[in-house]
Amino acid sequence: MRLDRAYERMMAVAVAALHEREPERLWPMLAGTLAEVCGGEAVIHKLDDWSESTGTVGTVPDAAAAELARLGDADLGLLRAGYPFAGHYGPGGDRTPVTAHRAVGRTWPDSPTARLLREVLDVDHVLGVPLPGSGEPVTGCLVYRAGTDFTDDQLVLAERAQPLLSAVERQRQLLEEWRRALGPAGAPDRRAADCALTPRETAVLLLLTDALTADAIGRRLGISVRTVHKHIENIYRKLGTRDRVGTVLRAQRLGLVPSPAPAEAARARPS
């Protein structure tokens, strides 16, 4: 697949993911497409806080997930440790995608991790695609393939895809937090759908509620200030409001965002 076409494919799926109401479906959509456009066969995506024993780890395709499900704790911990990428990225700010072979050279094929991957997934090479700006532990994707190592073009594509992955992950986190705050399961989504709010508009509304400026919302979501203002205009129109304060109050009454605690509400009332 040509570089430009592959990136367009990745962008189209990222845009579709930003309109997906089920946060748990976002990464399976992205990971499968990332494997496709980078010439990989399987992807492990590591999100939230994770270690060798805890944290959110997903896998595509289902066949790879089934193989990993059969692993014992020691082998699974070895994969979760993320060799050699955990050491390669470390505390520094460099998050450029790199393959395991390029990171550690000839020692990679003989490492315990490489041997385990050959036995379990029948793959030889791994491409690390960390999320830009992620701290420690570094979160993101590991793309696997058999045969030859990933090409220069595939590394370029992975780097171009990083901002797309990061934007979707920020939205996933917001929607997950929103669901936990408003529950029960499904209720917040139904209320947003009743108001015709898209998932992207819901994310902007949540940040409006946190009193973030349009500039800050744009930085948080990885979009331009102009796009933020467009989303805000849509939110005002759909909720029948004219300003930020009225919008937040209306959203609270509709159960779209959490209402302030009684003490906070009392402080917010004019004296």
Image (cartoon, grey):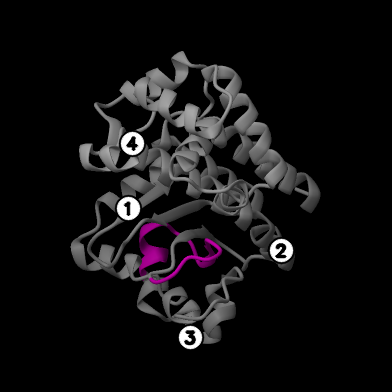
Q: Is residue 128 magenta?
A: yes
Q: Tag 2: residue type?
A: Val
Q: Position of residue 22 (x, y in %)?
A: 42, 31
Front tag of 1 and 4: 4
Front tag of 2 and 1: 1
Q: Which residue is mark 4?
A: 269
Residue 98, picture quadrant: bottom right
Q: Position of residue 198 (x, y in %)?
A: 54, 26
How packed is label 3: few (under 14 Cα within 10 Å), some, or many (20 or more)?
few
Q: Which residue is painted at 54% across and 76% down in the image? A: 93
Q: Which residue is mark 2?
A: 156
Whichever of callouts 2 and 3 sits on the residue coming sooner in the sequence is 3
Q: Nearest the camera: 67 or 81?
A: 81
Front tag of 2 and 3: 2
Q: Is residue 212 visible?
A: yes
Whichever of callouts 1 and 4 sits on the residue coming sooner in the sequence is 1
Determine which of the numbered discs, if any, sits on residue 56 in the image.
1
109 versus 220 height, above or below = below
What is the secondary structure assignment of the residue under circle 3? helix
18 versus 77 height, above or below = above
Determine which of the numbered discs, if any, sits on residue 107 in the image.
3
